[in-house]
Image (tube, rainbow, N blue to C red):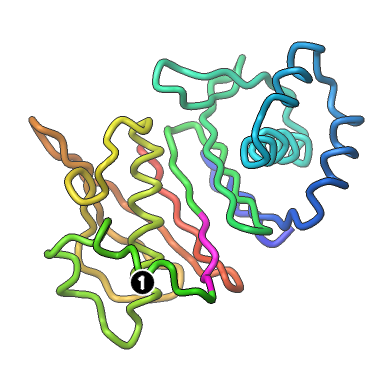
Amino acid sequence: MNLYTYYYHTIIMVFRWKHFLFLETMFLKKLFLSDKEKMFFLSLSKKRKIEFLGIRYALRYMGIKMNIFYNKKRKPFLFPEEKYISLSHSFEKIAVAISSYQIGIDIEKLREDKKIMKIKKKFIRDDESIFIHPNYEEDYLYIIWGIKESLYKLEGGIFYSFLDHYKVSPFSIKKDSCVSCWIIKNSYSKRFSAFYRKIEKHYLVYIIDK
């Protein structure tokens, strides 16, 4: 376990999941899954299997015994006590957030191939590029991407364009900082506060809608 953050309404966990096949076998034996759930799990891609097990590992670690359901926007929540869940994974790390409020979370590894530099035009707006410090461009790109990915999850994956529907206000990189950001709809815009921190070679971002 790398990170365990607790607020009165939200729990955030980040942990390493390096040996997936071993953990898959181990947790499938320990989890009490119905035959229907096991069949569903076996039909998933590796990415979705990691998410499936990651959420259940987090719940087990915290001693939470609740069922996972999905609302109309396909966002997971816990029943009978309605709490919302968001999950992200990047290479060997998984981030899980459980909150009384709707929440979006993202974790991204700083890649050696600099891929984020190659795709920045797909998600960086003109009014965002002007405040990115050239000496720390890669860090800015990961934080902004994480914010927009978290907004996307928060909204339920309705708006796909990271250029048209999500906006990040100017900020300077500081440790464990907060950034203003927006979901832009046709009729109105809504402001949120995004929180980010660097964990080893990863950036973690989360947004709580409260």
Q: Is residue 148 above or below residue 152?
A: below
Residue 167 included in the magenta stretch of the image: no
Q: What is the chief secondary structure element of the magenta stretch?
A: strand
In the image, taking residue 193 as reference, residue 79 lies left or right, namely right
The kind of secondary structure element at disc 1 is helix
Q: Residue 45, percent across and down?
A: 65, 35
Given residues 188 and 113, the one toward you in this image is 113
Label 1 crowd (10 A; few <14 / some 14-19 / many >=20): few
Q: Residue 150, percent across and down?
A: 40, 46
Q: Quadrant of residue 29?
A: top right
Residue 108 included in the magenta stretch of the image: yes
- The mark total stands at 1
Q: Residue 117, percent across and down?
A: 36, 71
**Residue at horizontal 69 percent and vertical 21 percent from the top:** 66
Given residues 49 and 61, the one toward you in this image is 49
Q: Is residue 110 above or below residue 192?
A: below
**Residue at horizontal 33 percent and vertical 33 percent from the top:** 155
**Residue at horizontal 55 percent and vertical 47 percent from the top:** 88
Q: Is residue 195 above or below residue 23?
A: below
Residue at the far bottom in the pictured view: 135
Q: Quadrant of residue 134?
A: bottom left
| Quadrant in which the N terminus is drawn | bottom right
Q: Is residue 157 above or below residue 163?
A: above
In the image, taking residue 111 as reference, residue 135 lies left or right, namely left
| Quadrant in which the C terminus is drawn | top left
Q: Residue 105, percent across and down?
A: 48, 47
**Residue at horizontal 40 percent and vertical 38 percent from the top:** 153
In the image, taking residue 38 as reference, residue 141 lies left or right, namely left
Amino acid carrying mark 1 in the image: Met
Which region shows up in magenta? Answer: 107-111
Q: Quadrant of residue 27?
A: top right
Which residue carries the number 1 mark?
Answer: 117
